[in-house]
Image (cartoon, grey):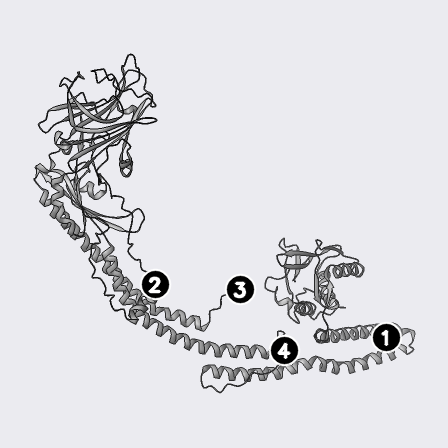
Amino acid sequence: MLRFRFGIRLKLLLLSLFLFAIPWLGYQYVWELESYLRTGQEQTMEGTARAVATALHERPSLFDSQSSYLQDVKPGTDLYAHKIIDPIRLDGQLDDWADYRHLSLRYGEMELIEQSEFYDSQSLQFEHMVGQYAQYLYAMFEVTDDNLVYRPSNSLRVDRNDYLLIAVTNAQGEFRRYIVAPQSSGWVNAYLLDENPESYRPVSLERAIQGNWAATENGYNIELRFPLEIMSSKIAFAIADVDDLEQRIRKYMIGTANPNQSDALGTVLVPSPEIEKILKGLKYSNARVWVVDKHMRVLARSGSIQAATGVRMAPQNRSRETLWQRIEQDWLFPLYYRILTQPPADFVDELENAFALKGQELANALSGDASSQWRLTPDNKAVVLSAAHPIFIDEQVMGAVVVEQTTHGIRTLRNRALEQLFHVIIAVVLLGTSALFLFASRISFRIRKLRNETESAIDEHGKILGNIPRSETKDEIGDLSRTFHSVLDKLQQYNGYLENMSSRLSHELRTPVAIVKSSLENLSMEEASDNDKDAKKEYIERAQSGIHRLSKILSSMSEATRLEQAIQSSDKEAFDLQELLNGCTQGYRAVYPNHHFKLDTQGLTKRLEGSPELFAQMLDKIVANAVEFSPQGETIDIGLSSEGAQIKLRIANKGILLPDDMHQQLLDSMISVRPHQQDDQTHLGLGLYIAKMIAEYHKAQISIQNQQDLSGVQVSVTL
């Protein structure tokens, strides 16, 4: 597992990050300043809304529309005349209505006024909307009719066919009905009907109501235009359907309201030109202003939200661009605006063609309380502030003024302040960080050099190969280098003493052992009486046993040294691990008949680079250790398994468990944890240490631990 190295350079670099607290504090200060600016903008907007509302208070003539006094507005019956930008060409094609079709309403079964049969939606339904351009009201009908029936050319009746019925009240409050019943597709005018609501007798041709009736595959389209002066705010439209050419009985009538009942008419709200004149001067106020009635329908508006930025910024002079300005534009500003947000040049305005508003601030204003609210645009690019103030007439709320601005101006002002702040601070941070980094790099380089010299002086087995040069630098690192030089010099002398101690001790012990051995041999060859023969024999056996144990100790003490020499002189060769394990296991079955051996290689084939003899010697040490701690008759498992890119060799035995704190120490020299020893055996704790040396020679890792089920011990060699 790789460990993250927390070096001196990184530590000093992290400490230098405290320098960034300076720009962070400046950044927080500017953000705090922006919050104060937003609070100021909010108060300014509320003041603007209050001022506009003041100009509209107690002016009932501006709200003389009947719909303004309705207690409730019924969608589909109470209509809204949407503002039309360009005049409509009356050709019956409805192409000019494409930008407004999403505002149209569908009329069907729920809007039935009369029916003589069970309603079928394929027989009659229509889409309808009205719009206002200049002093005219435009109406559009897209009618679905499975059987279009025109008025016969020789008939004086206008109600024995499909027709459009219009009912209005004029400015004097008089109830008027008009009918459009053409004999064919084309240009149409309306007929004024008799005042009797039950009569459909035409009185005169009303040329002020003009339009076009065009047949389609699914029915027909109607486009109409009539001046606003012939009506007040009450109106109703109805489409009548006749399918039977013989009886010519009216099958259905669907409409916005019942045009034959004067008290059932709906209303139409036309944006007020008088209020628009009052708001016209506000187009220079850097805000968008709405005036709505108490039903939240738009009476007038002024300005564009795209230009309502809140704060006007002086344009920067780009006539003579200096080198510093080019650096700012090409290098610094792109860096800054990875953190800062640039106000977008364009954003989605969901209220661009709105005919009705909504929002908590407007609801509060229509309740009599001025209010404001922040909102995000649908594309999350702009923040819009809305402030609303009620309009009072006779102490009753008749509408509200809504003033809107974006925060683009404040955001631009904030960005310019942060740009100048970053210019100053980034220079301080870069210079301070660079100085600390260079200082840390110098210290880190010297420490790494000392580390490399120390590592090269000692090999992987701990043998001292040489010494490090003495440093003449008069600081702490130089003093540490000189201390390492002195320590390594003393360790090299002591290591030489330890390396020669085994051979010296062996040489010193072999001479007395040889003398004792020869004496005992001579004693055994002397003749003795029968009485002393048994006693001499016992002494001789004890002496020979002691000599045998002394010889074994000497052999064990020099075994590690001989093995190290064998490893240094051994040439590596490729050998098959599975074949080696099979051969060794067969030998163990013969050498240790009181134990069972189980080999499971799982069919793995692995060729190693090393010494097969040394590898077999490592297995001998591990298996001998397992046999010694395993009760007779138990099975010793030898197995290979694949773990990712590694192969693991495991030797497991049943028996005594290891102490919890001795798992790693058992691989060191002269360590043994046997609870008891037989008198005829010597244990110096070198077996697993020798196995560890051989494993490291083959670039393997060896470990010993208790089995998971706590039934015994397992030695693992990871290749």
Q: Pointer 3: what residue?
A: 2
Q: CA distance from mark 4 to mark 1?
A: 50 Å
Q: Mark 3 belongs to which amino acid?
A: Leu
Lower position in the chain sequence, tag 4 or tag 1: 4
- Quarter of the image that includes the N terminus: bottom right
Q: Are marks 2 and 3 in contact (CB under 8 Å)?
A: no
Q: Position of residue 657 (x, y in %)?
A: 65, 59
- Of all residues shown, which one is farthest toward the bottom? 472
Q: Mark 1 belongs to which amino acid?
A: Lys
Q: CA distance from mark 1 to mark 2?
A: 104 Å
Q: Pointer 2: what residue?
A: 334
Lower position in the chain sequence, tag 1 or tag 2: 2
Q: Is residue 565 left or right of residue 87?
A: right
Neighbour class for label 4 at 10 Å: few (<14), some, many (≥20)? some
Lower position in the chain sequence, tag 3 or tag 1: 3
Q: Mark 2 belongs to which amino acid?
A: Pro
Q: Nearer the viewer, residue 105 or 54?
A: 105
Number of marks drawn = 4
Q: Is residue 622 left or right of residue 36?
A: right
Q: Position of residue 224 (x, y in %)?
A: 21, 30
Q: Residue at x 27, y 69 (%)?
A: 321
Q: Secondary structure at mark 1?
A: helix
Q: Closer to us: mark 3 or mark 4?
A: 3
- Quarter of the image that includes the C terminus: bottom right
Any mark on residue 536, and which? 1
